[in-house]
């Protein structure tokens, strides 16, 4: 869900008009977003609507979402930039990934993050055409 909504958010925010949401996609979201916002976890709602305005309902979940724990908070901060179509520096990406990826580096144990946020970050970086 994180990767899907990240892709949709980036398309709406940063892609050329011809590749933004279709009329059918907009109609579907207008119809189903009120239902989705009630059942989706807050991290997924944040990824789908980080500013609380894209779906036209003025939801406060996205703008107020900060994540759980310092690692996830850092990831959410980076995601705000990525979901807007922005680019992160190499060191920032490297630091975020070292904190949240589920493997040990140099004896340090990562603090982790929700799978939806991590998926959103990875697909967001790809969609923004980030390179090494």
Image (spheres, grey):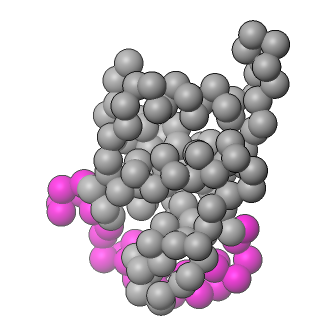
Residue drawn at point x = 45 percent, y = 25 percent: 91
Residue at the front extreme of this rendering: 70
Q: Please state if 42 lies on the left or on the right of 13 as rendered.
A: right
Quadrant location of the C terminus in the rendered image:
top left
Q: Position of residue 29 (x, y in %)?
A: 47, 78
Quadrant location of the N terminus in the rendered image:
bottom right
What secondary structure is the magenta-colored segment mainly?
Answer: helix
Q: Please state if 124 lies on the left or on the right of 76 as rendered.
A: left
Vertical side of 72 occupied by 129: above or below = above
Residue drawn at point x = 57 percent, y = 34 percent: 96
Vertical side of 27 occupied by 62: above or below = above
Q: Which region of the structure is painted magenta?
A: 15-41
Residue drawn at point x = 45 percent, y = 56 percent: 80
Question: Is residue 16 found inside the magenta-colored segment of the image?
Answer: yes
Residue drawn at point x = 54 percent, y = 61 percent: 47
Vertical side of 132 occupied by 71: above or below = below
Does any portion of residue 95 appear in the rendered image? yes
Q: Position of residue 112 (x, y in %)?
A: 75, 38
Residue at the top extreme of this rendering: 106
Q: Position of residue 94 (x, y in %)?
A: 52, 25
């Amino acid at each position: 869900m994180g990767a899907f909504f990240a892709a949709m958010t980036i398309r709406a925010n940063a892609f050329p008009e011809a590749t933004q949401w279709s009329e059918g996609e907009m109609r579907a979201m207008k119809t189903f977003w009120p239902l989705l916002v009630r059942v989706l976890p807050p991290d997924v709602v944040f990824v789908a609507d980080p500013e609380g305005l894209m779906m036209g309902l003025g939801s406060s979940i996205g703008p107020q979402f900060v994540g759980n724990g310092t690692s996830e908070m850092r990831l959410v901060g980076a995601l705000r930039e990525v979901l807007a179509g922005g680019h992160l520096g190499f060191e920032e990406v490297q630091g975020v990934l070292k904190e949240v990826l589920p493997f040990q580096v140099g004896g340090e144990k990562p603090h982790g993050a929700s799978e939806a946020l991590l998926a959103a970050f990875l697909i967001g970086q790809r969609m923004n055409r980030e390179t090494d």
